[in-house]
Image: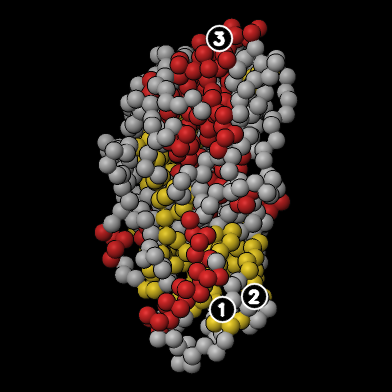
Amino acid sequence: MKRSSFLKSSLLAASLSAGSSFATTPIVADIEPTLTLPRGSIREMSGWIEVQNPNRVELWASARSFSSPLGYSVEVSSEPVLVKGGDRARITLRLSVTGDGLYHVAIPVNLLGADGSLVSRVEGTIDLEVRDGTYLVDKYENLFVRPVDQQLDEDDNEVFVFRAAPPRTDIPLSRDYALERWEIDDLSIITDGAVYESTPGSEGDEVQSPTLPLPPPRDSTLPRHVDPEDVKYTQSAVDERIQRALETGGKGVRQNGVKPTGLVSGMKGQGSFNYTGMDGLLHPAWGWRVYAYIDLGFISVSIAKTNVKANGSWSVNLPALPSGYPVHFAYEPRNIYFTLKNSAGSYYSFSSGAQHSTATNKTLNEYTQAAYLSNSDLVGLGEVHRDGMEFWESLKTKGEGIDPVPSKSISLHYPNTTEDCGRKDGKLWSCASTDGHIWIIPAHASGNVIKHELAHQLQYKFWDGKTPDDSSGTHKITDCYTTGLALSEGFADFMLVWSNLDRTQNGNTPWNVERPDLAGACTTKNLNELWVAGNFWDFYDSVTDGKDTIYYVHTGIVPKMYLNNGKHNSMSEYLSIFKSKASSNHQTIVSDIFTQNHQ
C-alpha cells in the first residue's frame, strides 16, 4: 500500500447507477434522542426522545432506563406515550456518563398497539464526546470515523486504516465463542441449484407435526465460489508483483539500502482477531479477511490471505519471499459475499502496526488482536458484519442450501453518511439497490436491518436483477402501497424474522409478522407488506393461529418458492405455487391462510 489523499472521499460517494432502483428499510417510526443543549456540563445532560409516527394508526412508545457496559446510563419515563398517526411525541430523557471519551448512545424504543402488544422495536442514537467534564454532541462520522492513515492499495483502491490492539483483559467474552458456526470455506460451496430443490414428497411437503429439514452440503470436495483475488496469491503472481514493485519503486533495495540476498520460505502467520461490540463484550471477527503484506519500505505488497474462523483464530501459509523485508498483517471486514466500505467506496483495514522479521520456517505470531468498535472506531460495524454472516449461514442451513453469493461481492456502505434512499424529508436511511449496493445508517447497526437489505439482494440474484412492478421507494410498514412493493418488501421483512427465529417462536421481532392487525396494518388485499410477510411466516412457523394449522416440512421451502419462480407482481400470484407444494387434503387450508393474511 501507499499513502493517499483525504480529498478523494470527501468528493466522491457511492450512488445509484443508471437503471437501478432502491428498496428501502420500512419506516416504522423515527426515533431521535436529543439533549436540550448540544454542549454543556455532564452534570446536566437532559433532554427527550422524540418519536415520530408516520403511520395512519396510533401507537404507544415505551422506553426503559438502563446502564450500558460502555459507560453511559439512560433514565427515561417508564410510562408509555401515545403517538397518534402522523404525529410526534416526546419521552423525557436524562443521560449520564462515567468519564471522558466518545459515546455512541443507542436507545431502544418499543412500539406497542392499543392492547399493549409489541408492534416493533426501533432504536435511536446520539453521539457525543466528553472532555474534562464537558460534553459535545456531534455527528457519528466526526467522532467514529477517524483513521490513523489513508492509503491506496496495489489496485489504487482507497483504504482507511485503523489501529488494532490486544483486547483488554477485563472485557468479558461473548457467547459467540461457544457457538458452532460454518466457516467461510463451508459457506463458499456453490449450491446455486439448491434453490430449485423443493419437490414435495408423496404426502406433500407440508405437515401438521414437526420433522427435520434437509441436511445442507458441507462436502470438502465440492467446488467453491472463486474469489477474484485468488489469482494474486500464487507463488508466481507474488514474485511478479514484488519484482515489479522493487524495479519501479525502490530500485531493488531494502529499507537500509542493502539488496536482498536470498529467499526465506516455509513461513506461516497465525493469530486471533476479534472486535469489541456494542454490548461491551468481545466477539470473534468471524469471516473477516486477513491479509499478509511484505513491507518494501516505499510500498507494501500483499502476499497471502485467509479468513478469521468462528472462534477468532486464523492461520495462513506464506509464500517464499526475498529476505530482509518485514511482514505485517491487516484485517478487513470483507468476504466474497459482501464487503464493508464507507459511503465513498473506500475499504476499511485494521492493523496492529507490528512488523515481523522473516526467516525460513518461522511462524509469525500476531497473538490476539482486536478492533475497538464499541466506543472508538466505526461503532456498530462489527454487528453489521456479524449479522451479514449469520444471514449467510442461515440461508445455507435452515435455507437448505440457498446460495446468496453474487458474481461480485456486495458493496455494503457503513456508516451511510450520504444516501437518503429516496426519503422526501432528506433524512439518511438504509436501503439496497439493484446494482449491488447496500447503505446502512448507524441507528440500524444493531437491529439486524442488514438482513432485510441482503434479502433484497438475494431476490436480485435469483430474479436476474428484476423486481416486481412499482416496488421501489420509501414506505411505511402499516400502510398500503402497490402489490409489487408489498410483495418485495414483505419478502424482505419475512426473511429478517425467518433468519432470526426458530419456527416454534412467535414472529414478533423486530416487527410483528404473526399479528399485523395489532399494528393496525392496512388490510386491502395484496397491498400491505406486513400482511405479505405474515403470509410467508404462516407457512414456515409451527405455531397454530386461526386458519394457520399447517406448515411446510422443509425450513427452506418458503423462501425457495419466492426465489425460484422468477418475477411476480403480487402475493396472490403465489397461491397456486404454494398449493402445488401441499397435499390434496390441505388445498383448502392453503387458501384459507392466504385469505387470513389478506392475500
Residue 390 can be seen, yes or no? no
Q: Answer whether labels 1 and 2 touch (C-beta < 8 Å).
A: yes
Q: Position of residue 46 (x, y in %)?
A: 41, 49
Which residue, as the protein is rendered here, is positioned at the far front? 236
Task: Provide the secondary structure element on which disc 3 rests.
Answer: helix
- Cα separation, mark 1 vs mark 2, equals 9 Å
Identified at 37% across, 39% down, the residue is 434
Position of residue 479 measured from the top left corner of the image (x, y, whole percent): 38, 23
- When asked about the image quadrant of residue 132, the answer is bottom left
Question: Disc 2 marks which amino acid?
Answer: Met
| Label 2 environment density (alpha carbons within 10 Å; few <14, some 14–19, many ≥20) | some
- In the image: residue 268, left or right of residue 447: right
Residue tagged 1: 321
Q: From the image, tell me which residue sits under label 3.
A: 592
Label drawn at residue 358: none
Secondary structure beneath disc 2?
A: loop
Residue shown at 45%/15% (left/top)? 572
Q: Nearer the viewer, mark 3 or mark 2?
A: 2
Crowd around label 3: few <14 · some 14–19 · many ≥20 (10 Å):
some
First in residue order: circle 3 vs circle 2: 2
Q: Is residue 165 above or below residue 116?
A: below
Type of amino acid under label 3:
Asp
Residue under label 2, please give it. 267
Label 1: few (<14), some (14–19) or many (≥20) C-alpha neighbours in 10 Å: many
Between 43 and 337, the one nearer to me in the picture: 337
Residue type, mark 1 in image: Leu
- Residue in the picture at 40% in, 44% down: 436
Image vertical order of residue 235 relative to residue 598, above or below:
below
* Residue 528 location (% of width, % of height): 42, 21
Q: Earlier in the sequence, mark 3 or mark 1?
A: 1
Quarter-of-image position of residue 27 = top left
